[in-house]
Amino acid sequence: MESFRDRRPVIVPLKDYVRWLAATDPGHLPINLLKPYPAEDMKAYRVGKAVGNTRNGDSSLIEPVHCEEPGPKQDLFGSLGSERALCPLDEG
């Protein structure tokens, strides 16, 4: 994630939700949960440009963008694949 931005949101694992949201004494906050989320547990993919507009807020914003390839694509055995490839992320 560091290659995308220098600020990252806190990603709290499901097992720690109750602890994160619990009302607690300010002297005993769950600050040990404020650590980098393992990169191997995340997946980066391209999303549409609408995600950059704060007026948008529906769930379609997190859908991956698929690349359009001209014509059907055949695999090694001659079968046509209906899967579209995910667009690669920009490097840089």
Image: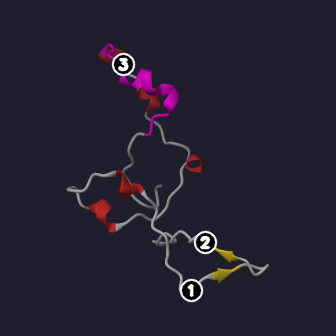
Q: Say if 53 sits above or below 72 in the image.
A: above
Q: Nearer the viewer, residue 23 or 58?
A: 58
Instruction: Pick out the residue farthest to the top.
Output: 25
Q: Circle 3 is placed at which residue position?
A: 22
The nearer-to-camera label among 2 and 3 is 2
Quickly name the residue at label 2.
Answer: 82
Horizontal and vertical percent for residue 40?
Answer: 60, 49
The residue to which callout 1 is attached is 71
Label 1 to label 3, Cα distance in Å? 54 Å
Nearest-to-viewer mark from 1 and 3? 1
Badge 2 element:
loop
Q: Quadrant of residue 28?
A: top left
Kind of residue sitting beneath label 1? Gly
Residue found at x 44% / y 39%: 11
Indicate yes or no whether the magenta region holds residue 60: no
- From mark 2 to mark 3, how far is it between C-alphas? 46 Å
Q: Is residue 16 left or right of residue 25?
A: right
Query: Is 14 situated left or right of 75 in this image?
Result: left
Q: Which mark is residue 21?
A: none
Range covered by the magenta-colored residues: 11-25
Displayed quadrant of residue 56: bottom left
Which secondary structure lies at badge 1? loop
Q: Earlier in the sequence, mark 2 or mark 3?
A: 3
Q: Is residue 14 magenta?
A: yes
- Seen at 43% across and 22% down, the residue is 18
80 and 2: which is toward the camera = 80
Q: Marks 2 and 1, Cα distance to the nearest angstrom?
A: 11 Å
Residue farthest right in this picture: 77
The reply to whether callout 1 and callout 3 are in contact (CB within 8 Å) is no
Residue 10 is situated, as x and y percent measured from the top left of the image, at 40, 40
The kind of secondary structure element at disc 3 is: loop
